[in-house]
Image (cartoon, rainbow, N blue to C red):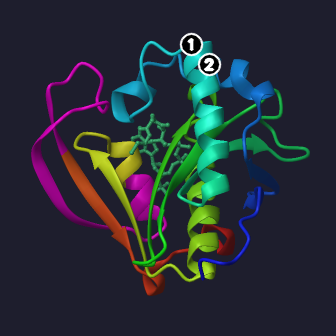
Amino acid sequence: MDSQPLPTELVVPHGDTTLVCRLPTLDDITAVVEACQDPDIPRWTTVPSPYGTEQGRGFVEWSLGNWGNRRGFELLITPGDGHPLAELPILGACGGRFDWAGEQASVGYWIHADARRQGVARSALGGLCRWLLDLGFKRIEADVLVGNTGSCRTLESVGFRLEGTRRSLAAGRCGVGADRIDQHTFGLLPGEFVDPAKG
Ligand SMILES: CC(C)(COP(=O)(O)OP(=O)(O)OC[C@H]1O[C@@H](n2cnc3c(N)ncnc32)[C@H](O)[C@@H]1OP(=O)(O)O)[C@@H](O)C(=O)NCCC(=O)NCCS
């Protein structure tokens, strides 16, 4: 499993059109910085705040480096041809980490504030999970801060199950402004996947 080449883009069905989840380039920094000004992104993820060109460049370099050494991935979600949100250069980002020996992966994502509640996260997450399961991963997991109803619902919509809640974790880079956080862990096993591409 761990010798298979990693693609640089995933084309994911989204309604009548597609999303293209692809590796970022340095040309994407401006769009990433613009999207990450939304306070809900650092509030619920490890994306730093404040977020400027330096952070955007770090994101691109981190993503390309990790892809190269196969430790993880961070893809930008962009509109495919004819997509109704084509005026936005990026619709969000999705990514995760690989544990090749344990055949497990973790995932995370954020969606541009102007692209929310239109099924983008569900479709992108679905495409990501389909790809990981096809590669042979036996477990996919995601951590969600307690109170992030939209993310919990997104995970449940493709079959993830709530497995437990860790209490009063040191916040670290997560949940900007908080000292300690409560965090749900969701897990998805292959037979549980609900593929959004199939209706
Ligand atoms: C959470 C987030 C990723 C959802 O993205 P999205 O593209 O709006 O989600 P979708 O439109 O694909 O919706 C997927 C499901 O979640 C539900 N949902 C999405 N946002 C919701 C919200 N704020 N409240 C309640 N339900 C919500 C949708 O109704 C849908 O449920 P359904 O399948 O039962 O209809 C987005 O709000 C976001 O980027 N938030 C800030 C960053 C973040 O929280 N990232 C995740 C960290 S774990």
Magenta span of residues:
153-182
| Label 2 lies in ligand 1 vicinity (Cβ under 8 Å) | no
Give 42 or 29, whichever is nearer the viewer.
29
Percent x, y of residue 181: 16, 36
Few, some or many C-alpha atoms within 10 Å of disc 1 (few <14, some 14-19, many ≥20)?
Answer: some
The structure residue drawn at horizontal position 64% and vertical position 35%, both measured from the top left corner, is: 61
In the image, what residue type sits under mark 2? Val
Q: Which quadrant would residue 11 be assigned to in this image?
A: bottom right
Residue extending furthest toward the bottom: 191
Q: Name the residue under label 2.
A: 33
In the image, what residue type sits under mark 1? Gly
Work out whether 28 lies above or below 2. Answer: above
Q: Could one spot residue 78 in this view of the protein?
A: yes
Percent x, y of residue 5: 74, 71
Give 106 or 17, whichever is nearer the viewer.
106
Point out the tag, 2 or 1, that comes first from the N-terminus. 2
Q: Mark 1 points at which residue?
A: 52
Work out whether 98 lies above or below 31. Answer: below
Percent x, y of residue 90: 72, 33
Q: Horizontal placement of 12 versus 106: left or right?
A: right
Would you say residue 15 sits in the magenta stretch?
no
Which quadrant holds the N terminus? Answer: bottom right
